[in-house]
Image (cartoon, helix red, strand yellow):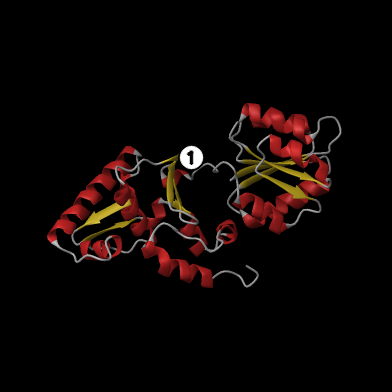
Amino acid sequence: MQTIIVDDKSAVVSMLQRILKRVDPAGTHTGYTDVRAALQDAAHIRIDAAFLDIEMPGTDGITLAKQLQQMQPLMNIIFITGHLEYMPEAFALYASDYIMKPVTEQAVVRALSHLRYHAEPQPEAHGLQVQCFGSFEVFQAGKPLRFTRQKCKELFAYLIDRHGAVCSNDMIIGNLWPDESPNETRKSMVRTLVTELAKTLRQAEAEDVLIRMQGGVSVDINRLDCDYYRFLNGDPLALHAFHGEYMTQYSFAEETRAALQQQLPASE
C-alpha cells in the first residue's frame, strides 16, 4: 500500500510512519510537513491512502483533501484531529475514516481495514482481489468480476476456501449440492462450471489462477490477493479486518469460519 502523511508537526509524521511500517511492512509510507511538497508528489505517484491533519497553518486538511481528490478521486482520505467539530465537514468529502489525537496503532489499523476504496491490487495477483471476510466477492482492478452464473462464483469460492487443495468432482458436488449424490448429471454440471470459470478468469487475464488436472481442480494461492490467505499468513491488517464473518452466503464455509474465529485475539 502507498500512503502519505501530512502534518505540520514532524513528531506526528514520524510516529505515524513507524505505526504504518509495523502494520504494513511491505508498503511505502511517505511523510510531509510541507503541504506543497505533498501536492507536487501526488501529481506523479499513485496514493492509496492519505493521513491528513485537519489543523495546519496556511492550508487546512479539508482544503488539502479537496485538492488531492481532484488529482486522484479514488484516494482514501483519513483525517487526524483533536476536535470533533470538524467531523461533519470531513465526512462530507467521503472520508474513509477520522482519527482522534493522540493517534494509536489500533485506530490506524481500524482505518486501513475499512477503506472506502480498495488499495491497488498486487501485480502478481493479476489485478484480482478476493474478499472472503463478510460476503464473498471478487474484484478486478477495483470492479466486481462478472461470473456467468452464481454457481460459477460459488465454485470459485469453494476452491478459494480449500486453500489450494485439489478438489474432485465428488467433493465439489458434495459442497455445492449437499443434498444430492454425485450422479452423472451433476458431474457434467461441474465440468461445465469449471470451463466457464476458466473462461471468466481468462477474460480477466488471470486464467493461470485456476489449476486443472486429471482428477480435480484447485487454485494457485500464490497468484491471488486474498484477505483470507493474508490472515493465515499473519498479516496485521487482515487479522484486524476479520470480525467473525467469512463467506456468509455459503454453508460450506462454516467450518473455516469457526476455525478463523478461534484464531481471533482474546480482545476481539
Q: Quadrant of residue 6?
A: top right
Q: Residue furthest front?
A: 179
Residue 251 in the image: x percent, y percent? 38, 63
The answer to whether one can see residue 33 in this image is: yes
Q: Identify which residue, 72 or 28, lies in the foreground.
A: 72
Viewer-proximal residue among 220 and 116: 116
Amino acid type of the residue that numbered disc 1 sits on in the rendered structure: Gly
Q: Residue at x 34, y 54 (%)?
A: 154
178 above or below 24? below
Which class describes the residues within 10 Å of circle 1: few (<14), some (14-19), or many (20+)?
some
Horizontal and vertical percent position of residue 256: 43, 67
- Which residue, given by chain and number where applicable, does mark 1 sit on? 142
Give the vertical position of 264 relative to 240 (above or below): below
In what element is the residue under mark 1?
A: loop
The residue under the point 41% across, 43% down is 126
Residue 43 visible (yes or no): no
Give percent across and percent down for residue 167.
Answer: 27, 63
Q: Is residue 219 left or right of residue 105?
A: left
Residue farthest toward the left in the current orientation of the protein: 184
Residue at the (65%, 54%) spot, across then down: 110
Residue 172 picture location, percent across and down: 26, 61
Disc count in the image? 1
Q: Quadrant of the C terminus?
A: bottom right
Please indicate whether residue 116 sits to the left or right of residue 13 in the image. Answer: left
Considering depth in this image, is 232 or 145 the residue closer to the camera?
145
